[in-house]
Structures are given as structure tokens and as C-alpha cells.
Amino acid sequence: MKEILLLLFVFNSVAVLAQQTPQDDEEDEPGLRALFARFGDLYQDNCAVCHGGSFEGAAQGTPLIGVELIHGDGMDEITRSIRDGYPDKGMPAWSETFTGIEIQSLSLWIKENREGMLITDIGLNRDIVIPTDTIQTEHHALRLEVLIDGLDMSFSIAPLPDGRLLLTEKSQGLSIISAAGEQSDYITGTPEVYGERGSFGGLGWLLDVTLYPDYESNGWIYLHYSERCEDCNATSRETKRPVSMNALVRGRIRNGEWVDEESIWKAPIDSYTGTTDIATGGRTAMDPEGFVFISVGFKTMDGNQDLASPHGKIHRIHDDGRIPEDNPFIDDPGAMATIWSYGHRSPQGLEFNAKTRQLWGTEHGPRGGDEINLLKPGRNYGWPAFSKGQNYDGSEVNHGRADLELELEDIEQPVVDLTPSPGVSSLVFYDGEAFPGWRGDIIVATLKASDLFRVEIDDGKFVSKEPLIENLARIRDVEIGAGGILYLLLEHAAGSKIVRVVPAEPEAG
Ligand code: HEC
């Protein structure tokens, strides 16, 4: 039975370009875990639109976890709910769409999630063991030093020129970490955030913090957050629940206060949704000429290919929010003028390489692998692509998206295809002094795989990949500090950490 399921889903993942789970829920380990991830795909593709990306409910559907189920939560009852539906209440019957095995797998997926399977799977509570020994890599010996422990679920660090770090904790706020590892009070006056300490899902988070390239002269700091509101659009009024969406402001810090705030980018209020901010992207990158790029993930399942929708896009604006006249869709009246590239899924990393003048990003793309992408203007990165392929039984694969017509050649392929998926997160281009052998390479962090690795790129093409640190923790962010040392932000539900990666003497022998 397990083998049959596995076979089915393996076939599907080859045939369907659109097979992917949200980046935080993914599993690539063999056996059951891989199976669960595939169940998640089925759910995300067909059910999340009504029941929410994290089962929290949405405009047209009820929550499936955190509540008692109306129609019972035994395997058989859930299976019956899915198979026969409640058409008069807005729940379609899925018996025509899915095989018995698929419906059963969906029930299992809901069941496992109700029982907390997801959290344990993704390693948010896995102990973080910081290696004390020297780690020998191809070019350098290195060691890790803990800067600070006990932080809440965090998203981003930004090294300041004076050796301190800015830190965002998603549902707490912005603070400053001193070079000695002490955390300041939260900066007052930053955009409002919501959520309990340690919470995994949620709406209304502080996301990326980014310094202006010329920060030392102008003091501008960019804060990417998800703006939350209630009773503010049709979805929130219908569901009587809050909704949220990516937004970008800039401001300065003066005496522990966030001042001079200016709104740089906001989405139309109708695009705010009740889907959790987990897959919302939320990164910011700046090029030295003052263009700002932001990554916006899928807070809805259907906006990613739609140029009128802000979802699943990289957007580009001037540093003050004006729209650049050379943006690729500026002359398309049906498109959002801020769009740089589209068809993105969960774009967790975004970085401008000042040397090559290229924008790069990471995400979980439509080919079953995580991706490192060179982000070119006007290009389509494919999510959620329609497959012209067939299921192994000869039937067409469309997962409810028969209306989406995409040719493979229209889709920009990743420079680095990371399969099996490590849950790729943030990236930096290394240009520091501490590890000269890495100059010009990409240092990439991962969540699920818990590894830091180095990717060598030549002329926009993949050359090689080396794991630098393995099985460390969910690495949410990686940044380069003074002298070229690396800072890693390690995510843990009961206490996130920041560690420094510094050069070590090579071990004798
Ligand atoms: C178009 C919106 C929509 C879609 C798509 C949808 N559902 Fe539902 N679903 C609903 C609504 C509305 C209800 C509540 C029915 C009721 O009130 O009795 C529901 C109820 C359910 C229930 C029973 C919940 C309970 O409390 O007993 C389950 C289980 C369920 N859906 C699973 C799924 C699965 C799995 C999928 C995807 C294959 C899916 N649904 C897709 C709208 C939807």
C-alpha cells in the first residue's frame, strides 16, 4: 500500500510541473516522509484556496485544524467529507477528481497535521547543536561562535557598519544586537506585528530588514513586513477574520525609535488574504544605484501567473517608491507596473550581485526541486505551470488548472536545480576578506536540510556545490559582517540563535 502510494506520487511529480509543497512543509526524505510531502502538494493545489495554506480556513472554507470538525475527524469521516463534499455549503465532492487512494492520502494529510506531525517534521523543535570543533572545508578551516541565544522566531539580520546587527523577530519586532551579543529593547514605532512567541503560522509579521547600500551617509533602513488588517476588504468582511499582505517601508532609527517612515510599496487592498505569511517571500534586495527589489510569494493560489496580481512576483521600485520607467511591464495596461519577474512560488532569498549587476533569488519552483534563479526582467519562472505531460495511467495532469496554458520554453529554468529539495532559504554573494577562497561564490542557507553550502557560478552557469556546514539548524538568514565573517540566523521554536562563522587555524595533520 505504501509502495503503491509512493509510486503514484513519484509518477505525478515527474509528470506534473506544478508539484511542490510550501517551503516550510517540505520533506524530501525517503519513505513515509516523502509521501507526506506529496499529500501536502495535493492539498496545497486543490484545497488551500478555501481551507487556507496552513488549514486555518479562508474566505470560502472552514479551518481544518485547531477546531473540532463539523462532520467528524476519524479517517473514514474525513474521507467521506472529501469524497462526497457538502455541495450546498460550498464544499465540492472530489470523487470525480481524485482516485480513492488520493482522497485517502488527503485525509491522512489532514489527520497528520491535526496531530502536529508537520511541526515535528520540519525540525522547528529539533535541538540545535553548535559544533565546537574546527570544520575543514575545501578552501578554509572555520569555526562557529554563538553570538546570542533565546530569540523568538526570527526572519532577518542586517550587519551595521559598527559591528552591531539589526534583527527582526517575526512577531516581536526590530531590535539591535550588540557585538557582545546583547539585545536592545524593541525599536518603537515600527509597523505593528502580531502573534505568540514561538508561533509557526500567522498573519502580520516583520520580515526582511535591509540597509541602504549607502547607509552610512543617509541612515535609511528598509523594513519588509506583512501588513495586517481587519474589516478592510471583501475577504476579511466575509470571513470576519484578519487578512495580510507584503508591504515595504523605509525609516531611520534614532534613540531607539523608528522615525522618518515613508511607505515604499503596498499592494492593492483586495490582494490581502487570510493565508498564513509562511510562504509570503518577504525578502528585499537593493542595487547600488538605488533600485529596490522585493519578493512576494503566494498568499493566494491563483495570482502567480496573473500580471494584474501582486502575488508570486519580484517587484522593482526606486528607493523612494517611484516606479522605474524601464520596468518590463510598464507599458502593459493590464499589468502591475512594479513587476520585475513572475511565476514565483515561495521566494525566500533575494540578493543583488553588485559585481555582475544581476539579481538572484532562491525559491521552491515548479520542477520538484528547489531553485537558485537568475532573475531577469519580464521573465516567467513557471509556478504553477500547466503540464502537457500525462499521468502514468494516460490521463491528463492538470490539478484543476486546465485553464493555464504554458509552454516549457516560456519558462525560465533555474541556474541551480536543488534536488532533492533542501528547503533553500537566504543567500549572499561572498566578497569578504575572512574567506578569500569563496570570493564571487554564493553562500546559500537551507531550512529543512539544515546545511550551509557554497555554490560556484561562472558566467551565470552552475559550476560546483560544496556543503560548508551540515546538519546545523534551520538557517533562516545568512549575512556577511565586518571583515567578511558570516552571520547565520538559526531558527528554533523555543529559542533562535545567531552564530558567527569565523576562520580557524587548519587542524594539524
Ligand atoms: C470551494 C471551496 C472549497 C474547496 C476547494 C475545498 N473545500 Fe473542503 N469545505 C469547504 C466548505 C465551505 C466546508 C464546510 C462544509 C460545511 O459547513 O458543512 C468544507 C468542509 C470540508 C471538510 C469537513 C470539515 C468539517 O469540519 O467536518 C473537509 C475534511 C474538507 N472540506 C476537506 C477538503 C479537502 C481535502 C479539499 C481539497 C481536495 C477541500 N476540502 C476543498 C469548502 C471547500
Image (tube, rainbow, N blue to C red):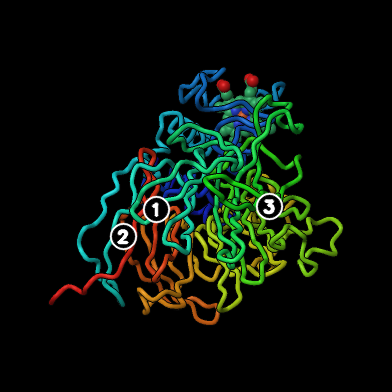
**Residue at mark 2: C-beta within 8 A of ligand 1:** no
- The crowding category of the residue bearing disc 3, from other C-alpha atoms within 10 Å (few below 14, some 14 to 19, many at least 20), is many
Looking at the rendered image, the disc whose residue lies closer to the viewer, 2 or 3, is 2
Where does the image place residue 284, in percent across and percent down from the top left? 59, 58
Vertical position of residue 240 compared to residue 168: above or below: above
* Labelled pair 1, 2 in contact (Cβ < 8 Å): no
- The crowding category of the residue bearing disc 1, from other C-alpha atoms within 10 Å (few below 14, some 14 to 19, many at least 20), is some
Mark 3 or mark 1, earlier in chain: 1
**Drawn side of residue 60 relative to residue 472, left or right:** right
Mark 2 or mark 3, earlier in chain: 3
**Drawn side of residue 281 relative to residue 113, left or right:** right
| Structural distance between the alpha carbons of marks 1 and 2 | 27 Å
Ligand 1 - quadrant of the structure image: top right
On the question of residue 376 being in view, the answer is: yes
Residue farthest to the front, as pictured? 255
Foreground of the two, 278 or 77: 278
Mark 1 or mark 2, earlier in chain: 1
The residue beneath circle 3 is 304
Secondary structure under the numbered disc 2 in the rendered image:
loop
Residue for point 42% across, 40% down: 152
**Drawn side of residue 81 relative to residue 235, left or right:** left
Where does the image place residue 501, in percent across and percent down from the top left? 33, 63
Where does the image place residue 413, in percent across and percent down from the top left? 59, 68
The residue beneath circle 1 is 178
- The crowding category of the residue bearing disc 2, from other C-alpha atoms within 10 Å (few below 14, some 14 to 19, many at least 20), is some
Looking at the rendered image, the disc whose residue lies closer to the viewer, 3 or 1, is 1
Q: Amino acid at mark 2?
A: Glu
Q: Amino acid at mark 1?
A: Ser
Residue for point 31% across, 55% down: 471
Residue for point 73% across, 27% down: 237
The residue beneath circle 2 is 470
Q: Amino acid at mark 3?
A: Asn
